[in-house]
């Protein structure tokens, strides 16, 4: 049994005007790398199987929220998602897979290293005067 394949249930908000969010999410996630299987179980429930070494549930949920799909936000659902996220991060760390850095972090690191005229050369205690 492969422990890197995760099977999760994603529930969507039933009060959302789009009553077929699960179908929309399935079409959206079908081409992502690491997604093994998608199954619509109801108008607001999507079953997803994915390889945690390639993609995490947090990545999947970020993609869904980026496309304005609304998750079911009960306390129990939030606790489950937090637990899944923690266990997947731990498993990826144990496998030696580093966390993905965002594009913003890459640009910020590059900006800090590059010499440019946007830095204040005065000592910290002098910056309060002016």
Image: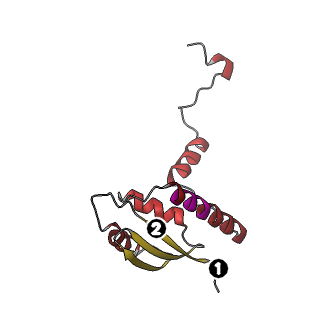
- At 47% from the left and 75% from the top, the residue drawn is 48
Locate residue 106, reporting x and y percent.
55, 52
Looking at the rendering, the stretch of residues picked out in magenta corresponds to 77-84
Tell me the element at label 2.
strand
Instruction: Give left or right: position of 14 versus 95.
Output: left
Colour setting: secondary structure
The picture places residue 112, in percent across and down from the top left corner, at 59, 41
Dividing the picture into quarters, in which one does residue 67 lie? bottom left
* Disc on the earlier residue, 2 or 1: 1
Q: Quadrant of the C terminus?
A: top right
Q: Residue furthest right?
A: 94
Quadrant of the frame with the N terminus: bottom right
Give the side of residue 107 with respect to residue 25, left or right.
Answer: right
Label 1: few (<14), some or many (≥20) within 10 Å? few
- Whether the magenta-drawn stretch holds residue 99 is answered as no
Circles 2 and 1, Cβ within 8 Å, touching? The answer is no
Position of 98 relative to 46 (above/below): above
- Is 34 drawn above or below residue 109 in the view shown? below
- Magenta run includes residue 81: yes
Along the line of sight, the residue nearer the viewer: 48 or 52: 48
Residue picked out by circle 2: 10
Q: Residues within 10 Å of mark 2 (few under 14, many from 20)?
A: many
Q: Which residue is mark 1?
A: 3
């Amino acid at each position: 049994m492969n422990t890197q394949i995760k099977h999760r249930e994603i529930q969507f908000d039933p009060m959302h005007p789009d009553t077929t969010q699960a179908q929309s999410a399935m079409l959206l996630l079908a081409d992502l790398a690491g997604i093994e299987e998608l199954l619509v179980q109801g108008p607001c429930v999507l079953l997803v199987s994915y390889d945690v070494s390639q993609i995490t549930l947090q990545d999947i949920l970020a993609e869904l929220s980026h496309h304005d799909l609304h998750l079911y936000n009960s306390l129990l659902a939030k606790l489950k998602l937090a637990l899944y996220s923690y266990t997947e991060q731990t498993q990826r760390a144990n496998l030696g897979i580093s966390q993905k850095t965002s594009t913003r972090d890459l640009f910020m690191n590059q900006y800090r290293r590059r010499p440019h005229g946007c830095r204040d050369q005065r000592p910290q205690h002098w910056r309060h005067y002016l």
